[in-house]
Image: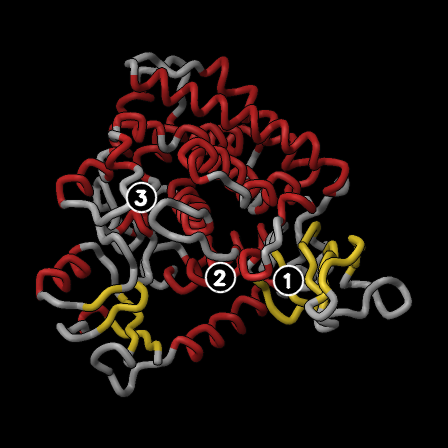
Amino acid sequence: MIKRIPSAEIRVGMYIHDLAADWSQHPFMRSAFPVKTEKEIETILNCGIPEVYIDTDRGLDVPDAPTQEEVNSALQAEMIAIAESEPAPRIRISTAEEIGRAKAIKNQAANLVRSVMADARLGKAVSMEAVEPVVAGITESILRNSGALIGLMHIKNKDDYTFLHSVSVCTFLVAFCRSVGLDPETTRQAGLGGLLHDTGKALVPDEVLNKPGRLTDEEFDIIRRHPRDGYEILLKTPGIGDIPLDITLHHHERVDGSGYPDKLAGDQISTLAKMAAVVDVYDAITADRVYHKGMPPTDALRKLFEWSKFHFDPTLVKAFMRCVGIYPVGTLVLLESGRLGIVTEHNEESLLQPKVKVIFDVKKGYLAPLEVDLAKPMGKGGADKIVSHESPSKWRIDVQRFM
């Protein structure tokens, strides 16, 4: 049985099922392993991980600890209540109309980040003349239809993760800023910060950045230097603003003071840096990496919500969930009818009743793609309901093919 316990209750002989933290917070190769030494417990505590999940079938038990099912059920109920509390963001054009432009913008932005990283390794300054038009293109796409580009951000090649992650953080941060009503100039500056936030990783050796095994303490320290390294690189960039510098330096800070590089806490961290932290972790845990399999977007949102007790601003996490939806665009969902569909667009009336492209029947196999608006009644193309979200790999479905 899987249970959640405070990290202070970890004992040698337990089996960690999940460290309940994003990979950047700890040096372990995996989030699941037997606890064999006191040093391992000390490492978990020193990393600022307040809770973990244990497997009581493979190690020691804590009798009164809540089960994973109990925790998830409570979190899901809270998330649904949040989703129903406010309407979805207004959409100007359909996802189908925007998707072509969104794909071009994604590729252009990834190539730019690749160039920025290469220049940084050579000691060259970042060219704001090259960066600003790309951020403008991302912002314009979000304004037309945020779901198109956001949906594409869940599709990444492992080999291009470093570059596409920066594009994703920029995209999510621009959408997040818009959804909470920030002004256009602040949103633009936040987008610049999102695109450039990981510039310091240019100085991390590839063998450390992409190491498939557990990091040594020295390697973990190298990784944790990237926010300050990026900040130092951007300081030399003519025209860079305070907001991109702040996001670059502080996107790994946590509200409980467990982050880095400065161990800031609470109001010591700016709102935009807190927002960047949320989207940075969301994108990181949904992506496939050499050392872990990405989780479905809905599961990632539930993890963020759970971790907001300690690491993130709960109000901002709730706002981000309303921004991307409980079932973000690109999510594979199982319907009451036994069909599988891909979320293509949110309905302004309800985040729980999006538009989906039905592509598969669990008993019959692939179907001719059919657009279904779950907000519509019987006879109007609707009258179906989401039962759960699904892993595309479980059904061997290539989501990108249908976007």
Identify the residue at the far right of this view.
Answer: 379
Frontmost residue, 342 versus 92: 342
Give the label, 2 or 1, closer to the camera: 1
Question: In this rendering, would 152 be left or right of 299?
Answer: right
Q: Which quadrant is home to the C terminus? A: top right
Which one is closest to the eye, mark 3 or mark 1?
1
Upstream in the sequence, badge 2 or badge 3? Answer: 3
Q: Nearer the viewer, residue 311 or 374?
A: 374
Q: Residue at x 23, y 39 (%)?
A: 224
Secondary structure under the numbered disc 2 in the rendered image: helix
| Residue 195 rendering spot, x and y as whole percentages | 45, 30
* Residue plotted at (36% across, 19% down): 118
Amino acid at the residue labelled 3: His
**Quadrant in the picture for the N terminus:** bottom left
Secondary structure category for the residue under label 3: loop
Write down the residue under mark 2: 299
- The crowding category of the residue bearing disc 1, from other C-alpha atoms within 10 Å (few below 14, some 14 to 19, many at least 20), is many
Disc assigned to residue 208: none
Seen from the viewer's position, the closer of residues 151 and 370 is 370
Residue type (three-letter) at the residue carrying disc 2: Asp
| Residue at numbered disc 1 | 333
Q: How is the image coloured?
A: secondary structure
Q: Please, what is the three-letter code of the amino acid marked with disc 1?
A: Val
Q: Earlier in the sequence, mark 3 or mark 1?
A: 3
Q: Whole-Å distance between the Cαs marked 3 and 1?
A: 32 Å
Q: Is residue 314 left or right of residue 224?
A: right
Q: In the displayed structure, does residue 83 sit left or right of residue 117?
A: right
Real-space CA distance between mark 2 and mark 3, rounded to the nearest whole angstrom: 21 Å
Q: CA distance from mark 2 to mark 1?
A: 12 Å
The residue most toward the bottom is 63
The answer to whether mark 2 and mark 3 are in CB contact below 8 A is no
